[in-house]
Amino acid sequence: MKEVANVNIRYTKSTIDLTILGILSIKSMSAYELANFIENRRVKRMLKISTPAIYKVCKKLFNNGLLDGETVKEGENPEKVIYSLNKKGKERFIGLMEHFSSNIDPFYFDFNAFIWNIEHVEPEKAVKMLKNLQQRLIYFRNGVNMHEKEISGAPFSARMIVRQYCLIAESLTKWIEYTIQEFEKKNR
């Protein structure tokens, strides 16, 4: 396969693009190998990335001229494309790194839509729903705390992301406890 050069491409600020470009900066791989790399290192537990997205983004990055691709056939296996980062891809990688290190876009928790509407539910039922959310947040907190213990020898980046999740989970469990107390106090 030849490198495809497109001009006037509008790039998105994609964390999936950044993840794939970063991995390919280490080693050339097929989309299948990238998916396995991400799965084996539990990247999906830290970053929002799916296997179908990996295949789609590899093709997009290749078509946009950010990756080179070499079609190879090994034995009886079907042909596969081995993607490698080219100069334009490395520049895009650095650009995305600069973007995400200097821009904090607002992030949203989906359950805030639930909190926004909690007062429109019968108080007894609302408390039950809040306690359900509390249990889910405790489960999340316990899971990330356990994960932090499991990855003590993992690379720095993985340990720091998991630590971030631990701190967020701890804050959210304190927040939901406070929210339940305030809601119950308000409805006495």
Image: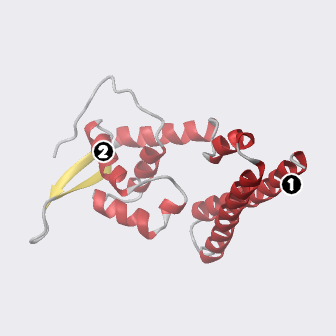
Q: Name the residue under label 1.
A: 181
- Disc assigned to residue 67: 2
Could you tell which of marks 1 and 2 lies nearer the N-terminus? 2
Instruction: Tell me which amino acid carries mark 2.
Output: Leu
Dot in front, 1 or 2:
1
Residues 118 and 165: in front is: 118
What is the quadrant of residue 178 in the picture?
bottom right
What is the quadrant of residue 144 in the picture?
bottom right
Q: In this view, does 177 lie to the left or right of 158?
A: right
Residues 135 and 120: in front is: 120
Residue 174 horizontal/vertical position (percent): 81, 58
Residues 112 and 65: in front is: 112
Q: In this view, does 127 lie to the left or right of 37?
A: right
Q: In this view, does 160 lie to the left or right of 76?
A: right
- Which residue is rendered at x = 9% and y = 71% of the image? 76
Residue 181 horizontal/vertical position (percent): 86, 54
Element carrying mark 1: helix
Alpha-carbon neighbours of circle 2 within 10 Å: few (<14), some, or many (≥20)? many
- Disc assigned to residue 53: none
Q: Distance between the residues labelled 1 and 2?
A: 53 Å
Element carrying mark 2: strand
Determine the residue located farthest toward the top in the rendered image.
8
Label 2 near label 1: C-beta < 8 Å?
no
Vertical placement of residue 30 versus 10, above or below: below
Q: How many marks?
A: 2
- Which residue is rendered at x = 29% and y = 25% of the image? 7
Residue 81 horizontal/vertical position (percent): 21, 55
Instruction: Tell me which amino acid carries mark 1.
Output: Gln
Vertical placement of residue 126 versus 12, above or below: below
- Which residue is rendered at x = 36% and y = 50% of the image? 53
Residue 143 horizontal/vertical position (percent): 63, 70
